[in-house]
Image: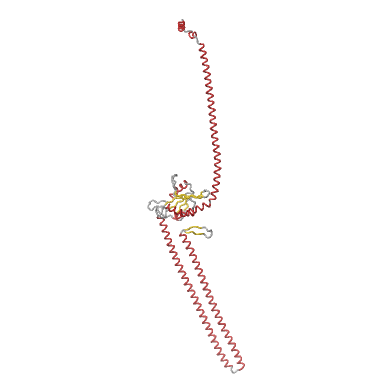
């Protein structure tokens, strides 16, 4: 992984080797094209300036030579005219000779002018030829430079393409090696690999985090690892339930990632975790899961599927997002705690009212029962009293009857008993 710092926001983010190589290729190609365009513009301008300078130099030289010849001709002409004028005034005789000489001079002058013009023409032709040769030389140099630059660019592109192809082959080999691992990964199991990855950055990135294997199966099932992190006040920042799944090459029945979503969601819910993440090597040819972090919250809330290389990045992303929302969570927990306190207070009042009402009803019920028992006791005692009074009355009547009982009354009308009592009396 390579760390890149954004020049605008100064935030660091990490990309893999493929992304880094692609960015580097774009930057180098762009810089090379800009440099090539600058060199072409510079050479073109230099060529145009050289041609303009040579043309101006030739033109100035030609004008200078022509001016000198004109001055010489004008001087000679003026001198000869003066001589002719003087000779004409002195000797008319020598007019014919002078005319002949003048004719000869004119001829010589014409020849001189022709020769001078010829020399100037030759010099101009020579300068034009030199300029053309120089221009051709410059053009050939430019073409040679362009060919050299194109060759260098082609060689650089070929070298870069070869490097990129080599990197891509290495990446493909690495991906293929990771995909074809059965139960071992970097010499360790997938779970151990993730644990090692986390422990390598724990002290720097997650010094206060809890990341341990889930060994609590009291709820009937368990995940693989649980990540929890709290702030200084004990408020939970984030909690994640991890499930690691690797596919064995010896297994005939290939599992799919979605086969483990339901169990992972249940484990997350039982262990009171906020997020659920499946670290999976399953479905190695599936472009969806090979593309990066896959959000499956449309199936189960706050659930993601990742490849092992995204294990640390997704923890970092979710943790940073949770830290940004920690302030709002703290305020929400405060309001929730206040609501809980009010609810508990109301519950205690309602509990006291319910208990008091229950005790009042029980006391009233027992009071009514006691009154009924007292009424029943009064009725029973009244009945007992009446029975006792009736018994006393019956005893009195019995006593009266006993007092009224005599032998005469018993034997009255009974001759047999009267005779018996008489015999006893005798």
Please say if 255 is above or below 399: below
Please say if 386 is above or below 285: above
Please say if 42 is above or below 299: below
The furthest residue to the bottom: 93
Q: Position of residue 285 (x, y in %)?
A: 42, 55
The furthest residue to the top: 426
Tell me how many marks there are: 0
Please say if 215 is above or below 100: above
Q: Position of residue 344 (x, y in %)?
A: 54, 41
Q: Position of residue 336 (x, y in %)?
A: 54, 45
Q: Quadrant of residue 90?
A: bottom right
Q: Looking at the image, what colour scheme do you see?
A: secondary structure
Q: Quadrant of residue 181?
A: bottom left
The furthest residue to the right: 89
Q: Position of residue 59 (x, y in %)?
A: 55, 79
Q: Which residue is more in the foreground, 192 or 245?
A: 192
Q: Which residue is more in the foreground, 297 or 15?
A: 15
């Amino acid at each position: 992984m390579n760390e890149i710092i954004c020049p605008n926001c100064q935030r660091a983010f990490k990309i893999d080797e493929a992304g880094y190589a692609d960015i580097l290729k774009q930057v180098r190609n762009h810089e090379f094209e800009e440099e090539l365009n600058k060199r072409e513009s510079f050479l073109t301008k230099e060529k145009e300036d050289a041609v303009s300078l040579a043309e101006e130099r030739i033109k100035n030289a030609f004008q200078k030579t022509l001016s000198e010849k004109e001055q010489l001709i004008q001087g000679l002409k003026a001198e000869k005219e003066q001589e002719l004028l003087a000779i004409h005034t002195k000797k008319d005789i020598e007019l014919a000779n002078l005319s002949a000489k003048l004719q000869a001079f004119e001829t010589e002058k014409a020849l001189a002018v022709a020769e001078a013009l010829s020399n100037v023409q030759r010099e101009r032709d020579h300068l034009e030829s030199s300029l053309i040769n120089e221009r051709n030389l410059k053009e050939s140099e430019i073409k040679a430079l362009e060919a050299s630059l194109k060759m260098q660019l082609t060689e650089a592109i070929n070298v870069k393409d070869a490097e990129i192809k080599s990197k891509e082959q290495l990446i493909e080999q690495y991906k293929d090696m990771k995909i074809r691992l059965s139960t071992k990964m970097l010499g360790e199991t997938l779970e151990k690999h993730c644990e090692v990855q986390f422990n390598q950055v724990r002290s720097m990135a997650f010094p206060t985090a809890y990341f341990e294997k889930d060994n609590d199966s009291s709820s009937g099932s368990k995940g693989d690892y649980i990540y929890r992190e709290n702030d200084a006040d004990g408020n939970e920042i984030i909690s994640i339930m991890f499930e690691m799944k690797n596919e064995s090459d010896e297994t005939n029945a290939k599992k799919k990632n979605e086969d483990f979503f339901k169990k992972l969601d249940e484990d997350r819910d039982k262990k009171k975790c906020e997020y659920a993440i499946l670290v999976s090597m399953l479905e190695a040819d599936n472009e969806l899961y090979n593309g990066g972090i896959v959000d499956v919250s449309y199936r189960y809330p706050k659930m993601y599927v990742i490849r092992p290389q995204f294990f640390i990045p997704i923890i970092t992303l979710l943790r940073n997002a949770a830290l940004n929302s920690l302030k709002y969570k703290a305020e929400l927990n405060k309001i929730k705690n206040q609501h809980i306190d009010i609810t508990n207070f109301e519950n205690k009042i309602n509990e006291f009212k319910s208990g008091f009402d229950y005790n009042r009803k029980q006391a009233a019920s027992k009071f009514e029962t006691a009154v009924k028992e007292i009424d029943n006791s009064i009725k029973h005692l009244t009945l007992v009293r009446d029975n006792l009074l009736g018994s006393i009355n019956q005893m009195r009547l019995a006593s009266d009857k006993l007092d009224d009982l005599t032998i005469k009354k018993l034997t009255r009308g009974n001759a047999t008993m009267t005779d018996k009592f008489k015999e006893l009396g005798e």
